[in-house]
Amino acid sequence: AQKITQTQPGMFVQEKEAVTLDCTYDTSDPSYGLFWYKQPSSGEMIFLIYQGSYDQQNATEGRYSLNFQKARKSANLVISASQLGDSAMYFCAMRKTGTASKLTFGTGTRLQVTL
Amino acid sequence: DTAVSQTPKYLVTQMGNDKSIKCEQNLGHDTMYWYKQDSKKFLKIMFSYNNKELIINETVPNRFSPKSPDKAHLNLHINSLELGDSAVYFCASSQLQGAADTQYFGPGTRLTVL
């Protein structure tokens, strides 16, 4: 069975600083994908970034990067130059290859960006 | 041009009633999903359809019945609503392509059962 662990229920970061949100995962499958989603207070789920288990390079999307350490089974999200609009819940999720394509989510981290 | 849309956004109803939530995607994806987010913000898969065929059916009470009339639509019907059904229900869609397929979510439907 797959499991995602996010150990930080809440984080604070000052505007313009970088912040790392932790995510560890557990799976016995060799092929899997790791995702991060953002949920602002308005409630929608916004896809941020994806990392494949066989990808050699860490994924980057604008100010978001994924620090993927396969041996440690961690997939931390790094947000650079934080903005007030980054204040939201952040969810790490995983899915394995296969027809049954469900995402397994972590419990989320609430990020608050301060002035 | 909304990619994944859900109606209604809010649904308030009495215990015992039957209600439906509709979902439509215009991304041309072949797979659609229903997720439930509880009061602690935990998200869990309920159902998934691929080309109108049910491929995931997690441990969900059979009061919940998904229906996919075509691959762009996935509706969720709930019979005999209970207090514990209060949650946010998200529809999502993706194009199956191995581990890389990205699921895009609708805006969610907040269901409140009184």
Image: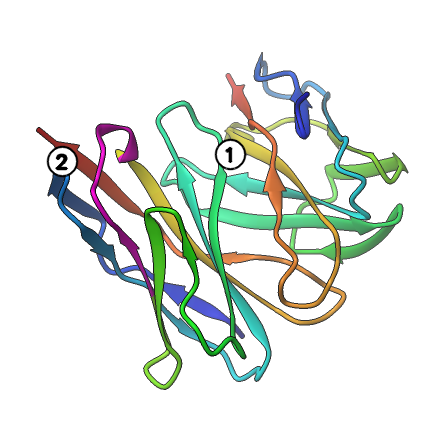
Give the residue at mark 2. Answer: A15
State the separation of the CA atoms marked 1 and 2: 39 Å
Subunit of label 2: A
Q: Nearer the viewer, residue A62 or B68?
A: A62
Viewed as shown, does residue B76 lie left or right of B13? right
Q: Is residue A25 above or below residue A104?
A: below
Please name the amino acid that badge 2 sits on.
Answer: Glu
Which residues lie in the magenta part?
A76-86
Residue A77 belongs to the span the image colors magenta: yes
Residue at 61% across, 31% down:
B106
- The chain containing the residue under callout 1 comes to B
Please tell me which residue is depicted at 52% across the width and 23% down the height of the picture.
Answer: B110
Which circle marks residue A98 in the picture? none
Q: Which mark is residue B84?
A: 1
Q: Is residue B37 above or below residue A94?
A: above
x then y, percent, for residue A5: 34, 64
Q: Residues within 10 Å of mark 1 (few under 14, many from 20)?
A: few
Q: Position of residue B65 (x, y in %)?
A: 78, 38
| Kind of residue indicated by mark 1 | Gly
Tell me, yes or no, whether dots 1 and 2 are on the same chain. Answer: no
